[in-house]
Amino acid sequence: MGKLTRFSALITAPIVIACALTVYVILRDVAPQGPLLAWVLLQSLLSVARFIVARFVTGTGKSKLASWLRCGTFFLQGILWAVPFLFFVPEGNIAVYAILSVVVIGVACGAMLTLLGEPTGALLVAIPALAGMQTALLSAGNSKLSIMAILSLLFFSMVAIAAMRLRQYFIENKRYQLSLQEKNAEITDKNARLYRLAHFDVLTGAANRSLLVQHGNAYLEAAGKAKKISAFLHIDLDHFKHLNDTKGHAAGDELLRVVSARLRAAVRLEDVVARLGGDEFGILAKGLDDPADAEIIAEKIIASLERPQKIMGSILHCRASIGIAYAPRHGNTISELMNNSDLALQQAKRLGRGKYRVCSDDLQAEAIRKLSVEQELRAALRDEAICYHFQPIIDTKSGKVTGAEALMRIESSHPIHSNTEELLTVAETVGLMDELGVQLFASLEEQGQKLFACIPSMKKISLNLSPAQLRAQTPIDQVESLLARKIFTPEQLQIEITEQSVLERGSDKALNAIQRAFDLGISIVMDDFGTGYSSLTHLKMLPINGVKIDKSFVRELNSDMRDAAIVRSLVGMCKGLGLTVTAEGVENHAQLETLRRLGCDLVQGFLFFQAKRVDELEQAIEEIGDRFAQGLAGIDLAAPMPDSASDGHAKSARKDETAQEILARLDQVRAG
């Protein structure tokens, strides 16, 4: 309204002055010149004053003083317009009355129409002028003048009503336009915020996965047609979870913001930096002249992130592992590049972290192989084809089967091209260990009692639990269920663990699971003993009942004096700690006899037979029962191996002279 007021004052000021001069011309011959000129001058000064008020006072604010000044100038002008009728016009001069009436009505209408934003001011001009005009006309006693007065009043009223309605229309339209503008601005702002929320990471300000995929796929399609090389760098911060656990999530969030800023500073403006989730970032490097440029970017990023950063009062160091994949060599879409760069990223982590690696054909072949294994595993789970087979454990003194190791197998009727180790590794990777455990424990429950029934000398069934299973603790829950339902007694079960269980992340959960099993009365055996980094510490600290000597020491037992010395030392140490010793991987009679003489308690391996179903194991026990009953002391070391050991995995038997020579030399060293 301020602009409209100033505009109307600017327009009406010259109009009013022109009208005042017109009145002067009309009345100069019938009115005194002095008062008439004074009237014209005063009318002009009031118009100029009203313009000054509108321009310099009203334009700077909406104070009451400005409003009073504006209304005062309007009212004075209205009174002045009535003066010609009352004082200057000769009585009964109809022509002069008519001309003055037109001028007054014109001024009043002009004020009304131009001052739509100031209806009060328009009325203050028109009402005094019309009142003076009507008084003069009616006092003349002329019927024509009276009619003219009435018609003038009606005309003015109609103009006033039309002007007020027009003003209301303009006001409502203005409000509507302003409302539309505000809504449009609000919608635009909301759309911008929604777009940013949908396509950018809130924490770091980097693009998110959705925008990366959308923009990246469009770019890669165009780049493929133009034969341009691009690269995708998959970045993962090393040990970020440890930072969150020790410094708190606020410090972790601040570090992510710092990392995002450094990544953007390390690449070109056209490259896309995105946060993929958690502590993972991705960079789409566009239009590379040489694939090696991506490796230069990776080196630059690693160096940039390794610079120390002060966060929440602490100096933090950040390292990252990076995997690189190229387009179109490793894929033509963001999804393909992400998958292949992730393969390279995992290799970089395996090689020690803080490095970068480029995706290779070998990595892709390995990924395809893992996918195939996963499909086989899922099919086997779906068909409930996974079960336990049992490999006997033999007492070296009595020659009797005193235990059996439960090993996962897939029914022969189900097509499978993967070994057990591959299946277990993939199951841990894709999160199928719980589902796998359900089927295995169902098999154990079904066949375990049959095993004890068919082999009277059986004392324990040994179960292998991986680090992932121990961390999840689900198998311990399943073992508790078996004990609670009296399917087995605690003395009938044994759990085999590896040193890796207490070395990997989450070892506290694994230790808790081991302690739970031990508290239930279940024996704990450390598998693959001698191959870890801190076996002696674990022998002291862990609640274990026995150890298994890894087959790598048994394989060359009768041909390498160092292996024989290691086995003798391990057996002696474990005996001193009151632990039972089992040797695995026994493949020939010479190894068996050597282990027996070194004091090993239990043995297992292909010399006897592979893992079998319970019914097959029962038949095998019957076939070689007489031999076990005679004891191992009478075994002829030169005798051929059993058929069960000749499956391509067992080696030929060592000569008796070689075994005797190794043992004799060890005895000499020990005596010396």
Image (cartoon, rainbow, N blue to C red):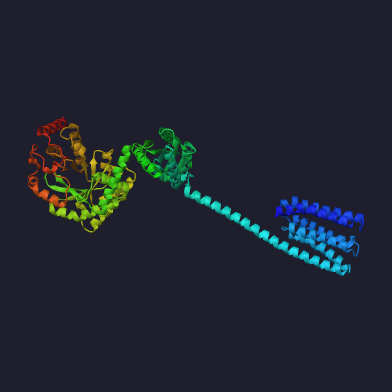
Relative placement, left or right, of 73 versus 506 is right
Q: x, y (%) of residue 468?
A: 30, 47
Which image quadrant: the N terminus? bottom right
Height in image: 554 above or below 475?
A: above
| Residue ranking furthest to the top | 672
Which image quadrant: the C terminus? top left
Q: x, y (%) of residue 642?
A: 11, 42
- Res 19 quadrant in image: bottom right
Q: x, y (%) of residue 244?
A: 42, 45
Residue drawn 82% across and 58% down?
77
138 or 462, which lies in front? Answer: 138
Task: State how many labels appear.
Answer: 0
96 or 190, which lies in front? Answer: 96
Height in image: 4 above or below 231?
A: below
Relative placement, left or right, of 73 versus 644 is right
Relative placement, left or right, of 53 versus 285 is right
Q: Confirm whether residue 226 shows in the render.
A: yes
Residue drawn 32% across and 48% down?
430
99 or 238, which lies in front? Answer: 99
341 or 11, which lies in front? Answer: 11
Height in image: 128 above or below 457?
A: below
Q: x, y (%) of residue 545?
A: 22, 46
Q: Confirm whether residue 514 shows in the render.
A: no
- Res 353 quadrant in image: top left
